[in-house]
Image (cartoon, grey):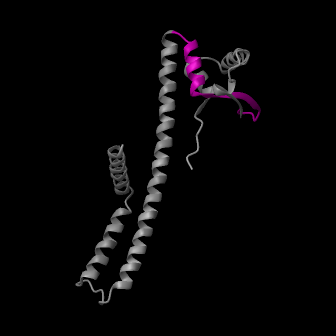
Amino acid sequence: MNKLIEQTIDSREVAEMVGKNHKDLMRDIRRYGGQLTESKIAFSDFFQESSYQDGTGRTLPCYQVTKKGCEFIAHKLTGVKGTAFTARYINRFHGMQEQIAQESERKELVALRKQIEKQNRLLMKAMSSRITTDGSPGTMEGRYKRDTAQLMETIRSEKLLRRIYLITRTISEQQQDKEL
């Protein structure tokens, strides 16, 4: 379920970040590729061949640059250019990681909501089979039904679900820490 998501930046964006023409960066990456291959180091850990379509519809080569590739390029740069590029690519990769984490958290919240709704349906079904009174609002069973329905309506709020999830996760982690 948790598949590894490869985070890369298009070489055109990297060229812009370092203040180079894309064709010059492509030349440099090809040169690095020869050097890495000669050293028996996997080129694909740093750069992955790709392509894009330009404004005229031509398919042109580019590279998808991994985080390692960005670090590699950053080490080749010096001074202000090197510092600025390092800061930019770090910010860019952190942004990607945050986006992935938010999407993952959203999926977990949706799953939690479905689980709570399912449990509530099962609970309501079990309770309704046990209720022998008329279930009017004045009875204990009627109040239970009303209160449970209000609680479920409140839980539908994603913000509240997020809080419930975070609290539950924190408690679970604390319990695991105590067991260790």
Task: Determine the image quadrant of residue 19.
Answer: top right
Residue at x 61% of width, y 17% of height: 20
Q: Residue furthest left?
A: 138
Position of residue 133 measured from the top left corner of the image (x, y, whole percent): 29, 89
Q: Residue at x 42, y 67 (%)?
A: 117
Q: Where is the C terminus found, in terms of image quarters?
A: top left
Q: Is residue 104 left or right of residue 56?
A: left
Residue 74 position, x and y percent, is: 55, 17
Q: Is residue 19 visible?
A: no
Compared across the picture, whether 57 is left or right of 45 comes to right
- Seen from this angle, which residue lies furthest front? 180
The residue that appears at 36% across and 80% down in the rendered structure is 127
Work out which residue is located at the far top of the displayed protein and give it.
79
Please state the horizontal and vertical placement of residue 111, each as a whole percent of the image. 47, 58
Q: Is residue 96 above or below residue 89?
A: below
In depth, the one of 122 and 111 nearer the eye is 122
Please tell me how many numbered marks the rendered image carries. Answer: 0
Check the image and report above or below for 116 versus 179. below
Q: Position of residue 113 (x, y in %)?
A: 43, 61
Q: For the magenta stretch, what is the residue range?
A: 54-78
Can see residue 97? yes
Left or right of residue 91: residue 15: right
Question: Which residue occupies the extreme right position in the image?
Answer: 58
The residue that appears at 46% across and 51% down in the rendered structure is 106
Residue 60 in magenta stretch: yes
Task: Name the image quarter holding residue 39.
Answer: top right
Residue 130 quadrant: bottom left
Position of 179 relative to 83 (above/below): below
- Residue 106 within the segment the image draws in magenta: no
The one nearer the camera, 67 or 173, is 173
